[in-house]
Amino acid sequence: MHRALRVACAAAALAANACTLNPVDGQSIANTSTSISFAGLSNTANQQVRVEVISGGSTPLVIGSTATAPTVTINDSGTDLFAWSLNATIPSSRWVAGTTGSFARIHTRFVGAALDGSDSFGYTFRPDWSSCHAANPNLGNFLTRCKSPRSPDAFIYTSDFPAGVDLIIRDMLPPPSPGARIPVIVRNNGRPGVVGHVTCSGGFSIDSLTVNVTLNPGEETEVDSFIPTTGTTSVTCTVDGTSEGGGAEANTTNNSRVETL
């Protein structure tokens, strides 16, 4: 592991008990049956560590458990730190399908590690941590700006998962009452991104609403989008958005839907 990430993880361990070096948020693996290497640091020896999957179910599922080393394994900061590692496979039931491929969401639980005796969770880092570090060489800035915005969680993707955000209109519902707007259900079947606009047309009317809602993989949002004119029998809605970094949505094959009222 690159020393910059290792040192940043060490600082994170000092600040919040623990961190996860591998996987980073956004890491790709070959397929859902691939064994994944998990590793990180803690500021406590013999600390119980659990890797949990939080996608595909209502409660976290423990897929691996270990303890941090009993002796010092890293000391870049001048303070004792202790490593942990394990290999685990995420069960098929805990993978969630995207437009193509699948994703899973995990975190690492450090049992009883908080000052009040409750559990704590380790920092995770962005997939572009290396270039982020180059732009933020100060350690404090690196921790602030280069940890994952989903930390302590991390998304893991199969290699055939969409490379960017992939917004789809999963459903369009009838207006709840005459003169009301049509609810449109937008789902993100790709990587983290932002729903920009939902544009609907039908009869002699067209309307575009600015949404500006962030969606992680598998998340949905409901947009009250369009008031159809009297006599409208068919409505077409289209959603557009951007990736987390601001780039335009690359996957747009499923972003329109037609419904008969």
Image (cartoon, rainbow, N blue to C red):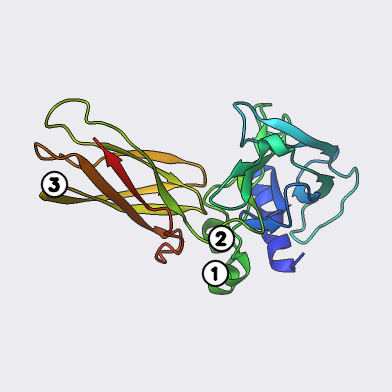
Which one is in front in this view, the residue at disc 1 or the one at disc 3? 3
Q: Residues within 10 Å of mark 3 (few under 14, many from 20)?
A: few
User: Which residue type carries mark 1?
Assistant: Asn
Q: Residues within 10 Å of mark 2 (few under 14, many from 20)?
A: many
Which one is in front in this view, the residue at disc 2 or the one at disc 3? 3
Residue at image point 47% right, 41% down: 219
Q: Report the disc number at residue 218.
A: none
Q: Report the disc number at residue 203.
A: 3
Rendering coords of residue 202 (x, y %): 18, 47
Q: How many marks?
A: 3
Q: Name which of mark 2 and mark 3 comes first in the sequence.
A: 2
**Picture quadrant of residue 143:** bottom right
The CA span between labels 2 and 3 is 48 Å
Residue assigned mark 2 = 146
Left or right, residue 63 beside residue 136: right
Can the viewer see residue 47?
Answer: no
Q: Name which of mark 2 and mark 1 comes first in the sequence.
A: 1
Residue assigned mark 1 = 136
Q: Residues within 10 Å of mark 1 (few under 14, many from 20)?
A: some
Q: Are marks 1 and 3 in contact (CB under 8 Å)?
A: no
Give the answer, above or below, for where 33 lies relative to 159.
Answer: above
Left or right, residue 196 beside residue 250: left
Q: Are marks 2 and 1 in contact (CB under 8 Å)?
A: yes
